[in-house]
Image (tube, coloured by chain):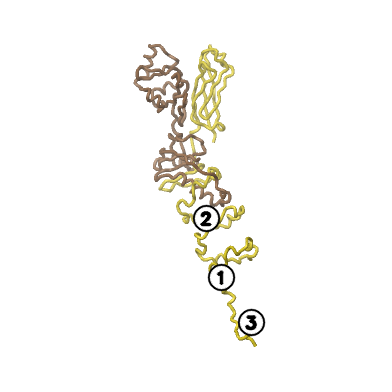
Amino acid sequence: MPGAGSILPGIPFIPFPSSSVQVAAGGIPAAAIAAGAITAAKFAAGAIDANAIADNAIDAGAIAAGAITAAKFAANAIDASAIANGAIDAATFAANAVDATAFAQGAADKVWSTAARSLTDKAGFTLTAGSYSVRASNTQRGTGTITNSTTGTITISSVTTTRAMETYAGASHSATGTANMEDTRIAITAATTITGTRGDNSVSPTTTFGAVVEELF
Amino acid sequence: MRHFAYFRQADGSYLREQLVDVAGPPSWWARVPAALRDWLFTRWSHLLARPAAGEVAIDVTQFDYPLGDFCWSVLRFGDGDNGKPLLDFPNERTFMQLDRRTAEVVGWWQSSRPCRSDAERLIIDVTGTPWESVYGAFGQFAHLGPIYFFLPDRQRTPAQLAAAAESLSPYDLTPERVMAGRW
């Protein structure tokens, strides 16, 4: 009689320990795994224990450039609430690890309302917009003249015309030039220009006009 | 493009400005957890500005002012709302404006920021000079020899020239200095 568990006469069966199946390096070539063969649904919850992955088990050098693309993560795939406070240690970022050129102006706009920071960095530091107050940069005033023409201009410090306004504007004419009073207008016509306009230049007297410009932030 | 102004950390005095070109937004920025954005933004802004030791950099992009417009500003620590730093423009300056073709004074302007010359208009900063006293007067700019004079109300006779010269002398507004637009 063959030995129990033997499939060949005279040759005893030596069972493999069921818990020590090993695959040699390169034993399963990636090409042998069909696309989609391994699906998340085939792993029971907790089947892959994060604690079983030794430190440095995944060598960053083994991940080809571009192998992990942002497009493979669904929106909100990384749940912010799952990242404990302090889990990402700022000290683990090397200098320049965050590439400034990867951010755009629009990205900055989204966090302009951040809270003020204390000024403690002794090696030079940066205050982002919104974390400081500003005073007296937005008011300017002056006067211009219109001579032998229907228009005259004043050059001003640059403003954004869509948020700048004249809080006071007026014009005066000499007594003999009262006809020029008709159709007098004063307006911000460009980022650095205020234009005064009068309806008639057929008489010589000069028209003077004044304006106060304010910009709203 | 972002605009940074730099101030001396010791006293808040103005040092310099620069524009920093920035590429488009990264596609993954929207997925960065909110808790990280603050830190990332501060780090990013600091990397962009690269303030030297002893400098404070301020992101002033929101004002849309030209490069150089903060030259007369001062950063006052702790003087702003809720103890924030205050970006102050303490002094207004006075600018006389001349038509380059006719040398006529055609405008006056007061601002805490620079007012710049262009192809048609010569802007002269007369702050602190005798010319500031004739603010608001229009007239002709003319010269006797190397000295330039302002003739209010279009005075043009030799006697008026001499009188104007006497009243405004010894302020020397030489052609080189005027035409360079340095004032």
Residue at the extreme bottom: A1
User: Which residue type carries mark 3?
Assistant: Ile
Near-viewer residue (A50 or A35): A35
The residue positioned 46% from the left and 38% from the top of the image is B87
Chain letter behind tag 3: A
Identify the chain drawn in yellow.
A
Task: Name above or below for residue B119 compared with residue B71.
Answer: above
Could you classify mark 2 by the number of other residues whose Cα lies within 10 Å: few (under 14), some (14-19), or many (20 or more)?
A: few
Q: Are marks 1 and 2 on the same chain?
A: yes
Q: How many marks?
A: 3
Query: Tell me, what hue is chain B?
Result: brown
Q: Which residue is mark 1?
A: A23
> Is B71 left or right of B64, judged from the image as shown?
left
The residue positioned 56% from the left and 45% from the top of the image is A110
The residue positioned 54% from the left and 33% from the top of the image is A160
Residue B175 got which mark?
none
> Is A130 left or right of A6, judged from the image as shown?
left
Q: Which residue is mark 2?
A: A65
Task: Name above or below for residue A132 compared with residue A173.
Answer: below
Label whose residue precedes the other's in the sequence (3 or 2): 3
Quadrant location of the C terminus of chain A in the rendered image? top right
User: Which residue type carries mark 2?
Assistant: Ala
Residue at the extreme front: A9
Residue A7 got which mark?
3
User: Which residue type carries mark 1?
Assistant: Val
